[in-house]
Amino acid sequence: MATPRTVAFYTLGCKLNYSETSSIGRLFEDAGYSEVGFKDGADIYVVNTCSVTDFADRKCRQIVRRALKYSPEAKVVVVGCYAQLKPEEIAGIEGVDLVLGAAEKFRILDYVDELSKAPGKGMVRAGEVSEARDFVNAFSFGDRTRSFLKVQDGCNYKCTFCTIPMARGSSRSDTIDSVVANARSIADKGVKEIVLTGVNIGDFGNGTEVIEGVRPKKEALFIDLIRELDKVEGIDRFRISSIEPNLCTDEIIEFVAQSKRFVPHLHMPLQSGNDKQLRQMRRRYKRALYAERVAKIKALMPHACIGVDVIVGFPGETEADFLETYRFLQELPISYLHVFTYSERPHTPAIEMEGAVAMEERRRRNQMLTILSEKKRRHFYEQHLEQPRAVLFEQSKERGRMSGFTDNYIRIDAPLQEALLNTLATVNLSQINDKGQVEAALLPLPV
């Protein structure tokens, strides 16, 4: 059998997964493979999975079936968090040929060579997550407007609901020199915006050096990294994807406030506005600290966009507890919410906790916070109407239109002007349309 020469990818989950898929794609490209669209009938399909929710697990099965629909003879390789957590389960999915764990996924070409034509149970190459000790740098490329740049991986936190430490291992980071070099490479490709990604990027600095096999105390901090990135020429914008509130220090907030490249957009997971739940979740802060961080951001950057992750239906969350979270979020000057319905994850402490919330009630609470998020986002947008704002334009999925985000993450919709794609331009924010986007005046001016 001749070596397959075409490969297609499907990515589930977070921005970190997208950066890693892109880097795996470059490995295939360097080996002589051609990347094709998912529907184009590839010889090899690589599915990069997430396992934050049960939905992601089910989605993996659906994607495998779709891949074989487009190319029945294709080899299907599954990598990512789900692959590390449940490799044998995935291997039992009809059509899966290879499952690679966290320590093996970047050696994918070595294992692909082992695939044979013989049908049978999927081959598993997934060791213990403790074997994932090295940092492998990654960044996405394909969208000329922005790139997701991985700076950190793994997590040392022990949140009771989370499987990520089991899927990705302990916290480890790239070096500042390597991140800066990657940023310069991205700039050379014409990309205008870099989104810094990781599992816990505020913990940057772990594992940046190893001396005689012993990891020393951090030689660098996240603040040191962003100060160096701010000097990189050719990148107009850096965006911090998500940062823990206890690691979003005053020093970082103050730096972003005065930076010309780091945009006024911070996403900080809260998870609960109730201190009882925060203790049960083993979060490393109380809600008072979260409120302090938001107040600091808004004091220095009144125009800043603040995004929030929150979980509803965590074990033991009573109606009173939920309403306390709701009121806390309602009063905070935040811009939008990412609402997650708690789902039981095997091998996590939370699954053993008493006070399970009925699924119907979890969904009701999710709906309430989703509506609150829509109100918060609209209010944030309304505060900036009839103001000039710089937008990085990109092609819209709608014919004859273009879209983009302001520095403070307001989604813009405008008539297509080809010359403005992948450029920064100043527009006047006129009105909110029925899609929840802000329409911009048609006479943008150069920044």
Image (tube, rainbow, N blue to C red):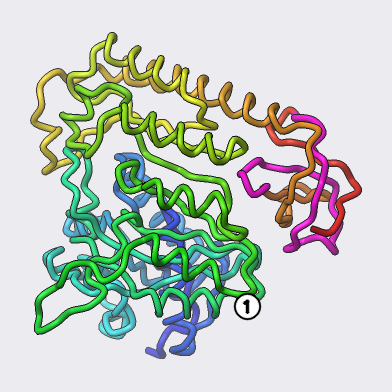
Residue 1 position in % (x across, y down): 37, 89
Looking at the figure, which quarter contains the C terminus?
bottom right
Which amino acid lies under the numbered mark 1 shown in the image of this protein?
A: Lys
Picture quadrant of residue 308: top left
Picture quadrant of residue 438: top right
**Is 418 one of the magenta-colored residues?**
yes
- Foreground: 62 or 445? 445
Q: Residue furthest top?
A: 320
Vertical comparison of 352 with 73: above or below: above
Direction from residue 394 to residue 348 in the image, left or right: left
Q: Which residues are magenta?
A: 406-433
Q: Read off the residue under disc 1.
A: 189
- Foreground: 153 or 239? 239
Vertical comparison of 234 with 167: above or below: below
Would residue 189 be visible to someone looking at this image?
yes
Residue at 76% over, 31% down: 385
Q: What is the tally of numbered marks visible in this picture?
A: 1
Disc 1 packing (10 Å; few <14; some 14–19; many ≥20): few
Residue at 67% over, 42% down: 411
